[in-house]
Image (cartoon, helix red, strand yellow):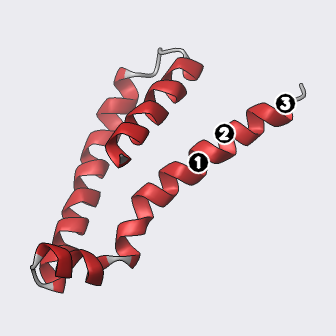
């Protein structure tokens, strides 16, 4: 079973975009706290709270979408990431 290079490139780009979206705030905590005018600790707490929310939602969401077409799911997810990041 061979994979097309274009398909693998799309999956790589999707993984890069999602991982960057998830981890970028950790490196920008000082700038985020300054722009929101809150303490560094509060910004870290909010980032940690977001992480806990993701943990709580992931398993039920995965069970709900287990039967969806994977290609359509990838396109939908990437569109939601693009809108959310814009």
Circle 1 crowding by C-alpha within 10 Å: few under 14, some 14–19, many from 20: few
Provide residue 7's location: percent of width, then percent of height: 75, 31
Give the mark, 1 or 3, whose residue is nearer the N terminus: 3
| Picture disc at residue 15 | 1
Circle 2 crowding by C-alpha within 10 Å: few under 14, some 14–19, many from 20: few
Distance of mark 3 from mark 2, alpha carbons? 11 Å
Considering the image in quadrants, where does the N terminus appear? top right
User: What residue is shown at x 24% (from left), y 67% (from top)?
Assistant: 48
Q: Is residue 12 left or right of residue 83?
A: right
| Picture disc at residue 72 | none
Q: Is residue 24 left or right of residue 42?
A: right
83, 42: nearer the viewer = 83
Circle 3 crowding by C-alpha within 10 Å: few under 14, some 14–19, many from 20: few
| Circles 3 and 2: CB atoms closer than 8 Å | no
Q: Is residue 13 left or right of residue 18?
A: right
Judged from the image, the secondary structure of the residue bearing numbered disc 1 is helix
User: What residue is shown at x 41% (from left), y 41% (from top)?
Assistant: 81
Distance of mark 2 from mark 1, alpha carbons? 6 Å
Residue 12 lies, with reference to residue 39, above or below; the image says above
3, 55: nearer the viewer = 3
Residue 69 lies, with reference to residue 9, above or below; the image says above
Extreme residue in the left direction: 38
- Residue that label 2 marks: 11
Residue 46 lies, with reference to residue 34, above or below; the image says above
Q: Within the image, what quadrant is residue 84 found in?
A: top left
- Residue that label 3 marks: 3
Q: Within the image, what quadrant is residue 43 found in?
A: bottom left
38, 56: nearer the viewer = 38
Give the mark, 3 or 2, whose residue is nearer the N terminus: 3
| Circles 2 and 1: CB atoms closer than 8 Å | yes
10, 68: nearer the viewer = 10
């Amino acid at each position: 079973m061979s994979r097309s290079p274009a398909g693998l490139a799309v999956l790589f780009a999707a993984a890069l975009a999602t991982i960057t979206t998830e981890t970028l705030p950790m490196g920008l905590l000082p700038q985020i706290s300054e722009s929101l005018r809150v303490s560094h600790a509060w910004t870290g707490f909010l980032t940690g709270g977001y992480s806990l929310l993701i943990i709580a939602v992931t398993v039920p969401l995965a069970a709900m979408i287990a039967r969806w077409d994977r290609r359509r799911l990838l396109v939908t997810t990437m569109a939601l990431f693009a809108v959310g990041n814009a």
